[in-house]
Amino acid sequence: MLQILNSDAIAVITGDEDQRPEVKILLELFGDDPPPQAWIRSHLHLLLQHDFAAFEDALAEYRERGFILRKRGGTGR
């Protein structure tokens, strides 16, 4: 989490980071209905790249459609 926020533990503990929109997105992950860990792992790269808008869009799609499994490298049959 600290790497994603480019922050340090003291800033997070003291609440200095509470107003950042990224924190809101991250807190949604740990809310009452978090996505499965497999979904989080498959979208973690967006957070590490600081593409919070794309992550938020993916999270909204998950909330609307659920976790969709796709076969990799297959022919689609």
Image: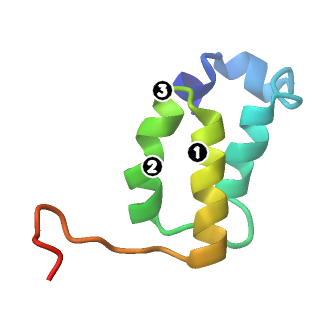
Q: Residue at x 21, y 71 (%)?
A: 71
SS at circle 1: helix
Real-space Cα distance between discs 3 and 2?
Answer: 10 Å
Residue 41 is left or right of residue 13, and the answer is left
- The residue pinned by badge 1 equals 55
Mark 2 burial class by Cα count in 10 Å: few <14, some 14-19, many 20+: some
Q: Quadrant of residue 37?
A: bottom left
Image quarter hosting the C terminus: bottom left
Crowd rating for badge 3 (residues with CA inside 10 Å; few <14, some 14–19, many 20+): few
Answer left or right for 12 relative to 67: right
Quadrant assignment, res 35: bottom right
Tell me the kind of residue under disc 3.
Gln
Instruction: Give the alpha-carbon distance from disc 1 to disc 3, as whole Å.
Output: 10 Å
Task: Measuring from the top left, give residue 38's x and y in whole percent.
Answer: 39, 63
The residue that disc 3 covers is 49
Can you say whether 69 is above or below 59 in the image?
Answer: below
Q: Dot 1: few (<14), some (14–19), or many (≥20) neighbours within 10 Å?
A: many
Is disc 2 in contact with disc 1, using a CB cutoff of under 8 Å? yes
- The secondary structure type at the circle numbered 3 is loop
Identify the colour scheme used.
rainbow
Q: What is the distance, in whole Å, between disc 2 and disc 1 at their CAs?
A: 7 Å
Q: Give the percent coordinates (x, y) of residue 11.
A: 76, 18
Q: Earlier in the sequence, mark 1 or mark 3?
A: 3
List the residue tagged with mark 2.
Answer: 43
Residue at image x 49%, y 69%? Answer: 36
Q: Residue 64 or 11: which is nearer the viewer? A: 64
Q: What is the three-letter code of the residue carrying label 1?
A: Phe
Image x and y of residue 17, in percent: 81, 24
